């Protein structure tokens, strides 16, 4: 999509390039992470309001270090170089960058020497910043001046006001530079003259028009899982193309308690979307009977899902030309850095991969430009309820990865009931949205208990609640004792077949979030 107001971020491979984008978007300015060697001509044609050169792990003086097109600096577009980006700026414009004797890493105090610098407008003269660099700028290019320094770094910030070019040796995008956000705000609004026009309501409006243009009179199929992304795609596409959208929801019998009914009610009845619910619990459970190996379970569920989805898709005949997917921005960032690393990967992401050859669709991916929290905001904008937009991540194979050992209808029922109580009790906590995931796990053992005068020999349920930023690492959540108490009481008293509840106090790594 063409955005009249945007900032380009050239990626030199820093681990935190995405954070620059997050910080800029939080200020309601659209931005994109693009290749480090994007030609100046291309940028000129797309006319960003500003250009940011990111940090990176390479050493500017190295011959094969990633460089920018030097003509960028002659476009008349404001430029901000961050860390490696500042060194690259200095190097390209005639300054000198030398390997430092020791790496400067961590918090540093910085002193602003020029309080008139537009980058530091409104900030106090002494600030904490986060440094992470080996090389140092030794000589700044002609026309540049120093505007801030730290004990270890005489050139913590430089500028050339005539050419609107700025450099920061530290990282304003990380939380350890508490006023970094203000600096990026100053860059976007004071220097690049952005107005902050990136609003989710406008995104919805623009995307609706774009989808209508892309799809025309054709029809679109969406695999709706009930997760945040596919739910938002459903609501968005429904707004754009109404009954040209067809959703298929596969109930594999391993959903949470009442989940299928909630989806049917919301999308089928309330939104009036053409929704096919494939009730295939029996098929899935039949194939899973007697299987307790977690990888085998996953494979069976994955391939059965494709079979069912393909079968229902064929039911639409030739009418459907497009397949919609909830691909998000972190999956499509197309920056190619020479060193690999997370910001460098080109991922082609297919939520519904492996469809048979007779089902060839073009893709509609209306969330390609968004981060997860923006997707949630779009969901709210479209009137989706909190139980959808604030939903925790839920594994594709569903409760199968939370039933250790054999999967039977009876064991699914026990787990659904226990899981419901875990969710209900935690959702009573005012800060429940701080908990990344919480759920029950059914263990393949029985233990002895007493109930009234009787001895029982019944199931053990483990409760898992974790905090995390992205699911890659996680810490067990310190639930208040009262909450643990009510979870345990309710499960043991209300769920037949459970006489013991344990709380999982392991972190990831070395454990994982799911038990499998
Ligand atoms: P683990 O158990 O590997 O899980 O620590 C990390 C995160 O990924 C979720 N998860 C999945 N999500 N399909 C998904 O969409 C899957 O097959 C799957 N397996 C695990 C898990 O819930 C956690 O958030």
Image (tube, helix red, strand yellow):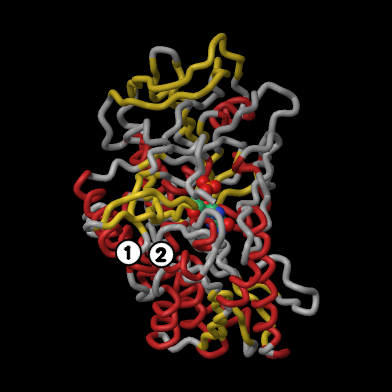
Q: Residue furthest left?
A: 482
Task: Please tell me whether residue 472 is drawn above or below residue 148 in the rendered image.
Answer: below
- Position of residue 431 in the picture relative to residue 261 (left or right): left
| Precedes in sequence: disc 2 or disc 1 | 2
Q: Kindly indicate the quadrant of the structure image that contains residue 9.
A: top right
Task: Please tell me whether residue 412 is drawn above or below residue 477 in the rendered image.
Answer: below
Q: Which residue is mark 2?
A: 414
Q: Secondary structure at mark 2?
A: helix
Q: Residues within 10 Å of mark 1 (few under 14, many from 20)?
A: some
Residue at 60% of width from left, 39% of height from top? Answer: 73
Q: Give the Cα separation between the discs numbered 2 and 1.
A: 7 Å
Q: Residues within 10 Å of mark 2 (few under 14, many from 20)?
A: many
Residue at 44% of width from left, 37% of height from top? Answer: 507
Question: Horizontal and vertical percent for residue 288?
Answer: 62, 66
Residue at 47% of width from left, 20% of height from top? Answer: 105
Q: Which residue is mark 1?
A: 495
Residue at 22% of width from left, 58% of height from top? Answer: 452
- Position of residue 48 in the picture relative to residue 456 (left or right): right
Q: Kindly indicate the quadrant of the structure image that contains residue 349.
A: bottom right
- Position of residue 113 in the picture relative to residue 470 (left or right): left
Callout 2 touching callout 1 (CB < 8 Å)? yes
Task: Please tell me whether residue 400 is drawn above or below residue 159 in the rendered image.
Answer: below
Mark 1 CB near ligand 1 (8 Å cut)? no
Question: Horizontal and vertical percent for residue 424?
Answer: 28, 62
Quadrant of the rendering where the N terminus is positioned: bottom right
Pick whichever, 286 or 362, lies toward us: 286
Identify the mark at residue 185; answer none if there is no mark: none
Pick whichever, 515 or 203, lies toward us: 515
Pick whichever, 375 or 49, lies toward us: 375
Visible in this render: residue 75? yes
Q: Secondary structure at mark 1?
A: loop
């Amino acid at each position: 999509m063409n955005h009249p107001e945007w900032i380009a971020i050239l990626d030199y491979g820093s681990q935190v390039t995405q954070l620059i984008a997050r910080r800029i978007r939080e200020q309601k300015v659209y931005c994109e992470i693009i290749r480090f060697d994007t030609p100046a001509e291309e940028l000129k044609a797309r006319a960003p309001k500003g250009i940011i050169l990111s940090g990176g792990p390479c050493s500017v003086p190295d011959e094969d270090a990633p460089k920018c097109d030097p003509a960028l600096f002659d476009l008349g577009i404001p430029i901000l170089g961050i860390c490696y980006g500042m060194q690259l700026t200095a190097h390209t414009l005639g300054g000198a960058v030398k390997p430092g004797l020791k790496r400067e890493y961590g918090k540093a105090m910085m002193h602003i020497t020029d309080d008139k610098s537009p980058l530091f407008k409104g900030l106090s003269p002494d600030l904490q910043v986060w440094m992470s660099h080996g090389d140092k700028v030794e000589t700044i290019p002609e026309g540049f001046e120093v505007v801030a320094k730290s004990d270890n770094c005489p050139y913590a910030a430089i500028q050339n006001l005539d050419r609107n070019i700025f450099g920061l040796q530290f990282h304003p995008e990380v939380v350890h530079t508490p006023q970094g956000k203000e600096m990026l705000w100053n860059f976007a609004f004071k220097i690049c003259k952005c107005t902050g026009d990136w609003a989710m309501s406008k995104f919805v409006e623009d995307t609706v028009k774009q989808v209508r243009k892309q799809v025309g009179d054709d029809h679109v199929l969406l695999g709706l899982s009930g997760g945040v992304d596919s739910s938002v795609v459903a609501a968005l596409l429904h707004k754009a193309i109404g009954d040209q959208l067809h959703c298929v929801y596969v109930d594999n019998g391993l959903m949470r308690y009442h989940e299928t009914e909630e989806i049917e009610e919301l999308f089928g009845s309330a939104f009036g979307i053409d929704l096919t619910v494939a009730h295939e619990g029996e098929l899935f459970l039949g194939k899973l009977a007697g299987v307790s190996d977690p990888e085998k379970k996953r494979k069976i569920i994955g391939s059965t899902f494709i079979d069912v989805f393909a079968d229902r898709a064929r039911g639409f005949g030739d009418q459907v030309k497009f397949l919609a997917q909830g691909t998000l921005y972190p999956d499509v960032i197309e920056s190619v850095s020479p060193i690999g690393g997370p910001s460098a990967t080109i991922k082609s992401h297919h939520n519904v991969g492996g469809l048979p050859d007779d089902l060839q669709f073009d893709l509609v991916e209306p969330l390609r430009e968004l981060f997860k929290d923006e997707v949630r905001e779009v969901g709210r904008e479209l009137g989706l309820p909190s139980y959808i937009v604030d939903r925790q991540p839920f594994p594709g194979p569903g409760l199968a990865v939370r039933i250790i050992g054999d999967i039977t209808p009876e064991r699914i029922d026990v787990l659904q009931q226990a899981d419901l109580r875990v969710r209900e009790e935690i959702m009573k906590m005012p800060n429940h949205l701080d908990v990344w995931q919480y759920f029950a796990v059914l263990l393949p053992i029985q233990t002895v208990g007493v109930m009234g005068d009787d001895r029982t020999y019944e199931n053990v349920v483990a409760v898992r609640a974790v905090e995390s930023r992205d699911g890659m690492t996680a810490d067990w959540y310190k639930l208040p004792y009262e909450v643990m108490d009510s979870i345990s009481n309710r499960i043991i008293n209300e769920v037949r077949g459970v006489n013991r509840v344990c709380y999982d106090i392991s972190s990831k790594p070395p454990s994982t979030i799911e038990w499998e």
